[in-house]
Amino acid sequence: MEIPEQYAALLQSNAVANIASLGPDGAPQNNPVWFEWDGEYLKFSNTKGRQKYKNLQRDPRVSVSIVDPTNPYLYIELRGKVEKFEDDPDLAFINKMAKKYINQDTYPYHQPGDERVTLYVRPEHIPAR
């Protein structure tokens, strides 16, 4: 899916993405995450013990909203599916996000026993406004 040009800067910014998934009872679950847009996928990190990971293993559909922190009226919503779950045992992706978002080389909140995974969302629809 091609992303409209007016959102290119937002997808490369340090805004956070709010990712909504469906819980086991069908209720929505939404939380902010650090993300990277590579031109094809919106990527974010999670741990295998979290509810978001479990939700997306069961039902890969997501809705993602990203609001421009300098202009709350500029935002993009993407709907799609998680197409790939990639283990991140050396924490390369989450460390990259720590550098982008908090200018630290190493993610400071890693806990022993956390199993990190990078999730790849392919946008399928951008709702009209």
Image (cartoon, rainbow, N blue to C red):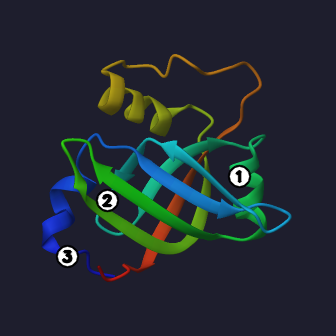
Mark 3 Cα shell of 10 Å, populated few (<14), some (14-19), many (≥20): few
* Image quadrant containing the N terminus: bottom left
Q: Nearer the viewer, mark 2 or mark 3?
A: 3
Label 2 is placed on what type of residue?
Asp
Among the 4 quarters of the image, the one containing residue 99: top left
The residue lying at 36 percent from left, 18 percent from top is 104
In this orientation, which residue lies closer to the viewer: 81 or 106?
81
The residue lying at 77 percent from left, 25 percent from top is 113
Label 3 is placed on what type of residue?
Pro
Query: Which residue is under mark 2?
Result: 38
The residue lying at 41 percent from left, 70 percent from top is 78
Query: Which residue is under mark 3?
Result: 4
* Image quadrant containing the C terminus: bottom left
For the residue labelled by badge 2, is the local secondary structure a helix, a strand or a loop?
loop
Q: CA distance from mark 2 to mark 1?
A: 21 Å
In this orientation, which residue lies closer to the viewer: 114 or 56?
56
Task: Classify 20 as above or below 113.
Answer: below
**Mark 2 vs 3: CB contact within 8 A:** no
Q: CA distance from mark 1 to mark 3?
A: 29 Å
Query: Which residue is under mark 1?
Result: 53
- 8 on left or right of 17: left
**Mark 1 vs 3: CB contact within 8 A:** no
- Percent of width and height locating residue 63: 52, 67
- 108 on left or right of 57: left
**Mark 2 vs 1: CB contact within 8 A:** no
Mark 2 Cα shell of 10 Å, populated few (<14), some (14-19), many (≥20): few
Q: Which of disc 3 and disc 2 is earlier in sequence? A: 3
